[in-house]
Amino acid sequence: MRDDPTLVEQIQRDLQDVRWLGPEEIRSRARRRSQRKIVVATVVLAFAGVSAVAVAAPRKSPSPALPAAAPSAAPTRHEITTDALLQPTDLPQQVEVRLSDSGLGAPVQLDYELDDCRTSQGRSDGRKMSILSRSQTLMHKQSPSVATQSKSVLTQDLFRMVPEAATQLFTELDELVAPCAEWRSVGQVRTAEGIRTMEAIHRWAVVQRGFAGDDAAILRDSLTAPRDVQTGQPLGDDPSPMLMAIVRVGDTVSVLRARAGGTEAELVQLAVAAAARMCAAANPPC
């Protein structure tokens, strides 16, 4: 029979000597421990409050009042939306938008014939660049049953430009047009008798100013009917002058090209309406 107790037996003997606490004593000790935790937490918070007061104590005078915020400036507009263009209701006749386009960095072209006139004399075309542009063509509104092709009533190009360039477009307009006060244009024309060399005389002039927006001008091209260079015979009668309105509102410039046969008075009215619409895109705002 062995005399050495096993580990289990030794633990059992040791446990017989342990005094276990009764339920009431256990609950009493738990309550005292909870009260000590509350006291410690209260002391910590008290010290935290004293520390906060100590840190804040050196400030003896109120901080200077911040200056009142200045009213924010109007945001700079960039995109040209369609509401900045002429609307069909701005025209006296019924029209609809049939063609529209937009782009970045487009040149402000007044008339390609005017460009040819200047470059044929060794001059620059005089175009200025835009930041972005939006264009539209307004056509006669017709019934869907009408099969004939619609005719253009008005084309409009609306540009956003660097403000200095927009202003220079008008201050330099007379100088731009002056070399083309009378210019002979020569080209090939296909007729019933075949291809013939024809010539026409263009006469550009700035005929009105300052009637709309911040700047405005009417550019007129009075031209003769094409004339056969060999025979001197004209091809029809002299056409009506080609008219163009240029309007500036802030940093936006609109170029309006009227239909053939339109009058200067009609174009001025459309330019005034265009200037009012351009306020939706201009910087500074109207």
Image (cartoon, rainbow, N blue to C red):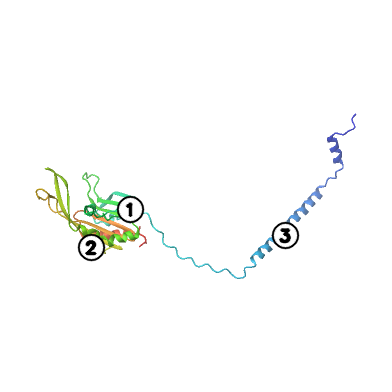
Q: Which corner quadrant holds the C terminus?
A: bottom left
Q: CA distance from mark 3 to mark 2?
A: 89 Å
Q: 10 Å neighbourhood of mark 1: few (<14), some, or many (≥20)?
A: many
Percent position of residue 109, x then y: 27, 53
Query: Of the residues shown, which amino acid type is indicated by label 1?
Result: Ser
Q: Nearer the viewer, residue 31 or 161?
A: 161
- Disc 2: which residue: 208
User: Is the residue marked by circle 2 packed among few (<14), some (14-19), or many (20+) residues within 10 Å?
Assistant: some
* Residue to which mark 1 is pinned: 133
Q: Is residue 197 above or below residue 181?
A: above
Dot 3 crowding, Cα within 10 Å, few <14, some 14–19, many 20+: few
Residue in view at x 29 percent, y 57 percent:
254
Residue 131 place in picture, x, y as percent:
35, 54
Give the mark nearer the N terminus: 1 vs 2. Answer: 1
Q: Is residue 144 above or below residue 209?
A: above
- Report helix, strand or loop for mark 2: strand
Quote the CA–CA distance across marks 1 and 2: 25 Å
Q: Residue furthest front?
A: 122
Mark 3 vs mark 1, CA separation in Å: 72 Å
- The numbered disc on residue 34 is none
Per the image, label 1 sits on a secondary structure element best described as strand
* Tag 3 residue: 43
Which amino acid type is marked by label 2? Gln
Q: Is residue 72 above or below residue 20?
A: below
